[in-house]
Amino acid sequence: MTTLQSFPRQGVPPAHLPVPLQAPIQAVVQQVLDDRRLVGAVILVARDGALIHQQAAGFADRESARPMTLETVFRLASVSKPIVATAALALVAQGRLDLDEGIERWLPEFQPRMADGHSARITVRQLLSHTAGLGYRFFEADTTGPYARAGVSDGMDASGISLEENLRRLASVPLLFEPGTAWGYSLATDVLGALIARVHGTSLDEAVRQRVTGPLGMVDTGFVALDPQRVATAYVNDTPQPHRLAEGETVSAFEGAVGITYSPSRLFDPQAFPSGGAGMAGTAPDLLRLLETLRQGGGTLLPSEWVAEMARDQTAGRELPDAPGFGFGLGFSVLRDPVLAASPESAGTWRWGGAYGHSWFVDRAQGLSVVAFTNTLYEGMCGRFVTDLRDAVYRALEVQ
């Protein structure tokens, strides 16, 4: 059995694994590369603590023919959310944060209001579950939306402002709904990052290192990448093949939304503010270490009761937009109804992704953790590849 600490950082698919087990997954990866919907990918599948599939395929950089490897570093975007959420829950477990306390206790300067001007109380739980009434600039219909007018950064652009300034701008825009009354994906994790830093008494980067990445040996995960030659080049789905993501390029993943303005170089700028919701970089094996630790109950990182709370749907039965059957926990989505979602995953499965082209899920009932990092947006986050890979993993399990 492969232990958590021995999940590989480099190499090829384990030779001892039966070919029928790997074949469905390899076929999906090869097809998406042949179709030129992805440039490169790293796929890791663990079951009951054993690594049953690992694969690095395609190019980390197509133009220089630099191959993808298990050591390749990716811009994580929203894959940072469960990492930062774990750091917050570690502080809750220590009694330094309270899930249902108003955040004004620790961040008195952050006091957004409703459209009619009345004050609103936001709790730590609401930040973690995206029920705080905040939004994202990239969801706005055009460049004249309230977040755009206020100059709010989504954490992936080269804004040149501090986290404190971004929160000031964010607080100047009325909340979209009364906290706790609806669900809306948002900059809440960036606010949570500022809260963690304040409570921990360090930078967010240092707090995450001490509470999560350090204890787990996630040595390649952080807010700044030190070696550009290890970082995957970012690409955008296009015809006849993906094009290289340009500095400052805006790409929308949703019809009717203006989209995300990207700064691929932001990752190398130590002065860029640490975006808890979108600003980290890391490797697939690093993320698998975290997911496996949480799947197994948290280990020394987090008491099991707080892992259970992370995994509990916090939305009071509300549906996530365009995601039938899913609710949301504290840092990731939670599958409520596999039939409604048309998914082979077990009820309670955790799942999320990242805008640079990533997806991951944990099916605790099956003892399963899957990480799929790609360098192609948005196919690797919400394209056909994501469901094809999911289905291939479950087909592979049938032959065990």
Image: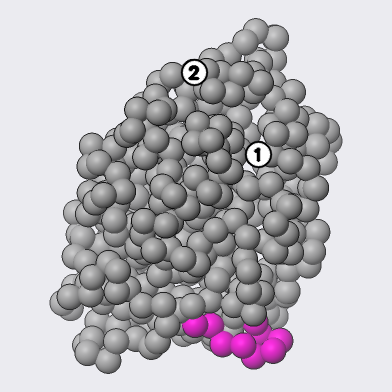
Give the Cα distance between marks 2 and 1.
Answer: 21 Å
Using the image as rendered, state which of residue 223 and residue 85 is in the foreground: 223
- Relative placement, left or right, of 366 versus 195 is left
Our reading of the magenta stretch's main secondary structure is loop
Question: In x, y percent, where is residue 246?
Answer: 78, 67
Question: In x, y percent, where is residue 364?
Answer: 23, 54
Asked if residue 258 is positioned above or below residue 20 in the image, the reply reads above
Instruction: Indicate whether residue 169 is drawn in magenta.
Output: no
According to the image, label 1 marks what residue?
136
Asked if residue 216 is positioned above or below residue 176 in the image, the reply reads below
* Residue in view at x 69 percent, y 15 percent: 115
- Relative placement, left or right, of 177 versus 368 is right
According to the image, label 2 marks what residue?
102
* Residue in view at x 79 percent, y 64 percent: 247
Question: Magenta residues, as a range?
Answer: 61-69
Mark 2 surroundings within 10 Å by alpha-carbon count, few (fewer than 14), some (14 through 19), many (20 or more): some
* Residue in view at x 48 percent, y 22 percent: 123
Which of the 4 quarters of the picture holds residue 308? Answer: top left
* Mark closer to the chain start, 2 or 1: 2
Q: Quadrant of the C terminus?
A: bottom left
Amino acid carrying mark 2 in the image = Gly
Q: Quadrant of the N terminus?
A: bottom left
